[in-house]
Image (cartoon, grey):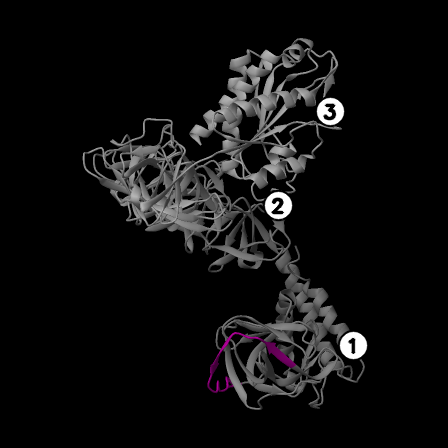
Amino acid sequence: MKFKLSLFSLLLFFLSVIILVPVTYASTFSNLENNKSTDTGIQTENDSNLFIQLKHEAQILDSNMDEVGVIHQNEIVSVKKINDGLYEIQGTFQIGTQTDAFLYLKNPDFTEIGDAGTNSIDGAEEVQQSISFDQGVTLSSISQNGTPSLSIYPSITFSSYYQVQDQIMVQWNNRFYYASPLNREQNERFLEIQGEINGVESPAQTDLNVNSTKGIQKIENAITDALKTENAIKATFKDSDKYFEVTENQVTVYDNSGGVLKPVGYLTKGQVYPRVSDFGDWHQIQFGNGFGYVWKDATKPVTTVTIKNENKGLAPSNRSFTANSQLTVYDNTSGSLVPFAVINKGEKYPIIGTLGEWLQVVVSGRVGYVYAPAVKLDFTANDKYFQVLADVVTIYDNSSGALRPVGYLSKGQVYPRVSDFGDWHQIQFGNGFGYIWKDATSPASGNSIQNKNMGLLNSGQTFTALNNLSIYDNTSGSLVPFAVINQGEKYPIIAQVGEWLQVDLAGRIGYAYAPAVKLGFSPSDRYFQVLEDNVTVYDNSSGTLQPVGRLTKGQVYMRVSDYGDWHQIQIGNRYGFIWKDATGVVYNPYIPNKSQSSVKFGKIAFTTLDNVTVYDSSSGSLTPFASINKGQTYRAISHFGSDWLKIDFAGRIGYVYKPATEVTYISRTIFLDAGHGGSDPGAAAGGYLEKNINFAVTQKVRSILVNRGYNVMMTRENDTYIGLYDRAGMANQADADVFVSIHTNSAGSGSSVNGIETYYYKYDPAYPSKINSAMHNDPERVSKSISLAKIIQNKLVSYTGAANRGSDGASFAVIRETKMPSILVELGFITNSTERQNLVSESYQNKLAQAIADGIIEYLNYY
């Protein structure tokens, strides 16, 4: 850290410049002719002058648009507008080696004012000599106690200057300023030298050049006197001195940890302080968890001292505060509060301990106290609780990657936090987390929380707030609001207690008023009630939502499953979908016409000739509870009298008026595929071929089904080879209702592996569909295929007593490329000698065929 140059060395610098520079006056003090060039390469847009007052600090640029200085906030400048965003500062200057240089401001933020006038000073004597500042210059206001107004970084020369007592003043941009070298240390020495010279002879009467022996002699005398003075100052403090007394008002304490001096507080005149070490022209003192620096010239040494509040070993805790304003530090050892230091506003400072409304700290080795309400306590990573200080503190959700307000907390309330999250507290909110801005809170203990959650878990049910929803704490016997959930937010429920919903918000148990919310559904909910008029029933079997009917407001229905934002319901031989937001949860409802049968439809189909009402007759009168749209085909269970059809609609038995429909009778098509054939024998063992066993069993299945009145088709009627995609294409062309491929398994010669297994289609990205991309992974097709596989597998094992290898998913071509529910049956292992003898037995084949046929019939009766 570099603070101050030697006075002697700086005076030698000025002397050497004067002696060595030629008579051409290129020296620090030289005459400069006033030649003004107008060729800047920049054309003005408007020749009229503007007077502007800067709202913020602005960079000074040269004609190359390089930064050469800075003008500070609130300074008034006379400029010409060049173009949008570029302004020329009035006047020309010698910057470095460039004579008559123009300076500019680019995109300054300013307020335009009238003529700013002049700020001349009475008694100022102009010296008709140029003056140069080789390392830049700081110009300071003559009307604001020397406040710096602007700085120029490179060497700059002024054609003349003014002497006002012991200060140098120049004219810049038609206004007068105190001038001093840009470097702080050089500035102080420069003023000292100027004062010495001024005391010898007036600059207006002295030629400061190599021909002035008298001027040189006067400077040599100034150097000698300054050297004596500096040696006297240096002798004031010894390295061994432990204490100093402040001799000036409000002596600044600087922090240098960032590489630049930053004021962080000040010490009080007349007070004595320990120092950590001697640091050149500075005292190094203890300040916070680091060091501060105090300028020696504002202090004097103290040899005999007793500091009653000198720190004798107290160490700071891990807690700190931030000063809300300039914060006085008091010594109370005398029984009164005696100020001895100030910590600047915004500074973070460590705490030793807390005594009521006071915080104990150490400043410059002395124990003091600051008023706690004047600071903001900072958080540590280990803090578990916080108290809200502002009226409405927003809770943000960040799950999407952007902050979204979801609620707010109440002033004065205390909350547990999940973790420290930088400038935020992470709290529990719903099934995730919320985030609270720390600056609106302070550390707290959790002792005041009476409704802390001690282990209650959320159920699967949620609600949506219809308006901003207050959450209450009732542990005091009264309802005390402690949080709000924003309108439209979805939130989980722990339990329902009468008209109240129990929730966990920020680790505290609270209650929300149930009529002020819309209850959501949990996956286990079986029923829903329609809350709006004529809620649409959609069919999605085509891949797009098509309206097929409507439900009646106030009626209750059974759902098959939860389907995201939808209820899935059974409508005849297919599924319908209801938008959840138009419904509400119902627990254990009484439904008088609830279907008690597993039979959902029969072989009767009807097409509606108009919108048809579905009636409940369980009360003895006809009560409408649904409708089927015009043109829809629906499967009925049976006829009911001569004028009615009995149907199952969303788990309820209903009746539609037969004359409003067109009735047809169903002939179901079953497609059977005997695996392999022709040049493809399949597996072989013991002199038997798989293709022959497959074909024999398939023929027996067809015979049984035809005798039961079903339409049956086969991929091959003899020992012919047919490709896999051709087999699937034949079934698709026939628009079959089900597809069953019959095979025999193998596991290597002599293997003991045995048993029956059945496969349904399961998507595998390694085997994409080639001719059935639209339907291969259709959820309804897959679901029905699984049902068909399980039914037939169970019957095969039951009828034969064979080992049950279960049903499983696979991506075999024939069940992937067919549009209808499809399965592939493996009847047994031809490679197992015992099972092979069964497979070629007529009686065993009959059992296999009967099981497959009965399974198909059972499936078709349901679907």
Q: For label 3, count other residues whose C-alpha is less than 10 Å away and answer few (under 14), some (14-19) or many (20+).
A: some
User: How far from the left and from the top, in percent, is residue 221?
Assistant: 70, 73
Residue 690 occupies quadrant: top right
Residue 114 within the magenta-colored segment of the rendering: yes
Q: Nearer the viewer, residue 788 or 491?
A: 788
Q: Nearer the viewer, residue 12 or 722?
A: 722
**Up-down: is 144 above or below 496?**
below
Quadrant of the drawing holding the N terminus = bottom right
Q: CA distance from mark 1 to mark 2?
A: 41 Å
Q: Is residue 473 left or right of residue 48?
A: left
Residue 635 occupies quadrant: top left
In this figure, which residue is indicated by the disc labeled 1? 19
In this figure, which residue is indicated by the disc labeled 3? 681
Contact flag, marks 1 and 2 (Cβ < 8 Å): no
Name the residue: 34% across, 32% down: 638
In this figure, which residue is indicated by the disc labeled 2? 240
Determine the secondary structure under disc 1: helix
User: How far from the left and from the top, in percent, is residue 726?
Assistant: 66, 38
Q: Nearer the viewer, residue 182 or 436?
A: 436
Q: Main secondary structure of the magenta part?
A: loop
The part of the chain drawn in magenta is 103-123
User: How far from the left and from the top, in percent, is residue 232?
Assistant: 63, 60
